[in-house]
Image (cartoon, grey):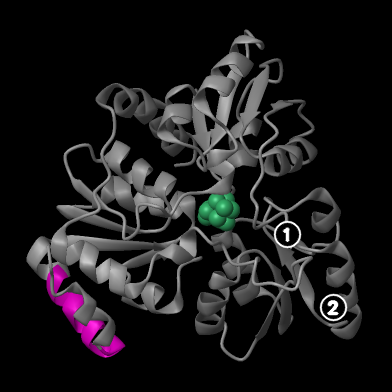
Amino acid sequence: MFTTLPAVSALPTQDLFEAIETLKKDLNAVVLAHYYQDADIQDVADYIGDSLGLSRQAAATSADVIVFAGVHFMAETAKILNPHKQVLLPDLNAGCSLADSCPPAAFAAFKAAHPGHLVISYINCTAAIKAMSDIICTSSNAVSIVQQLPAEQKIIFAPDQNLGRYVMQQTGRDMVLWQGSCMVHETFSEKKLVQLQITHPGAEIIAHPECEAVVLRHADFIGSTTALLKYAQQSTKTEFIVVTEPGIIHQMEKQAPGKVFIPAPPTANCACNECPHMRLNTLEKLYLAMKTRQPEITLDPDIQRQALKPIQRMLELSA
Ligand code: 13P
Ligand code: SF4
């Protein structure tokens, strides 16, 4: 069927901003965006945050429609928390390599091979993996959640081996790690990072815990995207090498004006430090999602119900 949709690309950005604001009111919608989204999506969002902040917002919203500018597992989490609300994702193909690295059937076998273990899953996983988990965590509360568990409790941590290793280091706990990883955070080159530090001796290196241990050992500060942003604001230093997806730099420049933020270089000569999944969302797709009220997130009701418990447990443990 022929539609008028192609005309959207001809609209100036300012008109799209205005059209999105009108649709927010018409639909009683809230736009939640992750820091890795394009700058103009961040500028139109009602709330921008890390995975924990976004989950908290999704749990608390009184909006009828949640427009999730992020990736699929994030929109799924919002839907699990709000089974009766409509959750829209601008591009349904916005997945996550880390979530994909943990297929449910293989994880069920892994879990069966480790009886008596509590399953803590990083929020970057599918609803099916969440449904098989005891507690969900994010990069901002993983260390604290593990610290709250009895010392003798055996733990499986999935799916990110890099975050898992970092948590083990911080807590002194042993955990069985699922060997998943994020294609974006594994792309940073230790060699290029060290070279960059030599040419910027006054800069602090701030890194996300999804990075590999060889990269994290050079960091002055490690934290979730929100923690990195707060650190950059509060630090007395004025120059930072940012070792995570560079979308966060838009907020850093807005919230710490006058400071300089340098994206850490990937191994190859490419833009592969940008998350290809996150970047599938565009302002135009966000507008169209609101106008047409699709693509919408739908979930198997049993999985949706089972996945809610470990998410609620996370929210209780990080209140
Ligand atoms: P946070 O939002 O917890 O910082 O995690 C980053 C990330 O990779 C999201 O996909
Ligand atoms: Fe997934 Fe990595 Fe992209 Fe985050 S940055 S959404 S973990 S692929």
Name the mark nearer the viewer: 1 or 2.
Answer: 1
As drawn, the residue found furthest toward the left would be 26
Question: Image check: 273 left or right of 285?
Answer: right
Q: Quadrant of the C terminus?
A: top left
Q: What residue is at 65 percent from the left and 40 percent from the top?
A: 160
User: Residue 225 at x, y = what percent?
Assistant: 57, 61
Residue flagged by tag 2: what amino acid is it?
Answer: Leu
Task: Rate crowding at label 2 as few (under 14), some (14 to 19) or many (20 or more) other CA atoms within 10 Å.
Answer: some
User: Residue 184 at x, y = what percent?
Assistant: 64, 58
Q: Quadrant of the N terminus?
A: bottom left
Which circle marks residue 153 in the picture?
Answer: none
Magenta segment, prevailing SS (helix, strand or loop) = helix
Magenta stretch contains residue 319: no
Q: Nearer the viewer, residue 36 or 30?
A: 36
Secondary element at tag 2: helix
As drawn, the residue found furthest toward the front would be 1
- Work out whether mark 1 precedes mark 2 in sequence or the reverse, and give the earlier one: 1
Which circle marks residue 196 in the picture?
Answer: 2
User: Residue 219 at x, y = what percent?
Assistant: 80, 62
Q: Is residue 26 above or below residue 76?
A: below
Magenta part of the protein: which range? 12-23
Distance (Cα) linking label 1 and label 2: 16 Å
